[in-house]
Image (spheres, grey):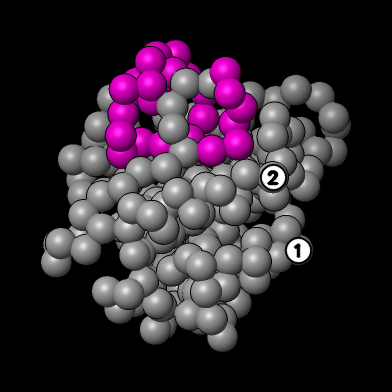
């Protein structure tokens, strides 16, 4: 799961990361808000299952690749990269992706990339680049589930955005009035997390032990 905003809408704390793992997440990926909360740097430096974007730069603590075991014993590598369009990235994802995926494939037949990006074009391009090399390329960051879950010809599942688990009666999680006030006035506004229409969103990918995806379906469950 991507957990970059579990700390009240921005960032993650060590305590919350542990909570996600205890709840059943095998790997937690992050994004542009990785280091928003205190104490998370040291936590990431020591964690093997909570990872930050691999292109976050050489000086930031943490790693961008995790390898875990599925229930049937098959190894699964999870990667995290940050998109370069409209986001500040120390290193272009395009520079590091080939080597990163190669590293992952050397350790696991199933390879899942969380590509945390702002632009649909960049996320679609990354999915195409990795067709036949990864099991799934899952887009995150934009919070709005896209209508393009698919398995590409080479056997790589993809969706441009897996959506948001959180309150959908909001502006991507924030109380709508506050987000609108900020946009209309250009003044700083303290954002608060909304509470209505909570949904769990994500994507369900099926694959063989060879890592080739056979199906890719969006998940959307109402919980309030
Ligand atoms: Fe993000």
From the viewer's perspective, tell me whether residue 205 is left or right of residue 86.
Answer: left
* Residue that appears at 35% across and 64% down: 110
Query: Residue 9, image x and y in percent?
Result: 50, 35
| Nearest the eye: 58 or 49 | 58
Secondary element under disc 1, as helix, strand or loop, is helix
Which is the main secondary structure of the residues drawn in magenta? loop
Q: Nearer the viewer, residue 181 or 40?
A: 40
In three-dimensional space, the C-alpha distance between marks 2 and 1, rounded to whole angstroms, equals 17 Å
The magenta stretch spans which residues? 34-59
Query: Does 57 appear in magenta?
Result: yes
Judged by depth in the image, the label closer to the viewer, 2 or 1, is 2
Extreme residue toward the left, this view = 72
- Image point (85%, 31%), residue name: 185
Would you identify the image quadrant in which residue 109 lies? bottom left
Residue sitting at 30 percent across and 78 percent down?
208
Asked whether the viewer can see residue 90, the reply is yes
Q: In which quarter of the image is residue 48?
A: top left
Instruction: Assign the C terminus to one quadrant of the image.
Output: bottom left
Callout 2 secondary element: helix
Q: Residue 95 carries which label?
A: 2
Residue annotated with mark 1: 121
Q: Does the residue labelled 2 lie within 8 Å of ligand 1?
A: no
Q: Is residue 35 above or below residue 130?
A: above
Mark 2 near mark 1, Cβ–Cβ under 8 Å?
no
Neighbor class of circle 1 (other Cα within 10 Å; few <14, some 14-19, many 20+) is few
Q: Is residue 46 left or right of residue 151?
A: left
Which of the two residues, 200 or 74, is positioned nearer the viewer here? 74
Which of the two residues, 99 or 138, is positioned nearer the viewer here? 99
State whether residue 218 is above or below residue 192: below
x 56%, y 48%: residue: 99
């Amino acid at each position: 799961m991507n957990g970059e905003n579990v700390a009240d809408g921005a960032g993650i704390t060590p305590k919350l990361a542990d909570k996600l793992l205890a709840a059943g997440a095998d790997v937690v990926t992050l994004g542009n808000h990785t280091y928003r909360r205190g104490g998370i740097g040291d936590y990431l430096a020591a964690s093997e299952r909570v990872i930050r974007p691999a292109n976050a730069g050489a000086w930031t603590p943490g790693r961008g690749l995790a390898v875990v075991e599925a229930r049937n014993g098959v190894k699964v590598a999870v990667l995290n990269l940050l998109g370069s369009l409209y986001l500040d990235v120390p290193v272009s994802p395009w520079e590091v992706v080939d080597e990163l995926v190669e590293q992952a494939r050397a350790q696991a037949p199933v390879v899942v990339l969380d590509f945390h990006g702002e632009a649909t074009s960049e996320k679609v391009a990354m999915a195409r680049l990795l067709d036949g090399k990864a099991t799934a390329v899952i887009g995150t960051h934009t919070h709005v589930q896209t209508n393009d879950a698919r398995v590409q010809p080479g056997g790589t599942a993809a969706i441009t955005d897996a959506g948001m688990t959180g309150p959908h009666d909001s502006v991507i999680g924030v109380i709508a009035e506050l987000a609108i006030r900020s946009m209309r006035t250009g003044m700083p506004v303290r954002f608060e997390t909304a509470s209505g229409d909570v949904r769990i969103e994500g994507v369900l990918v099926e694959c063989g032990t060879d890592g080739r995806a056979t199906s890719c379906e969006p998940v959307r469950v109402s919980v309030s």
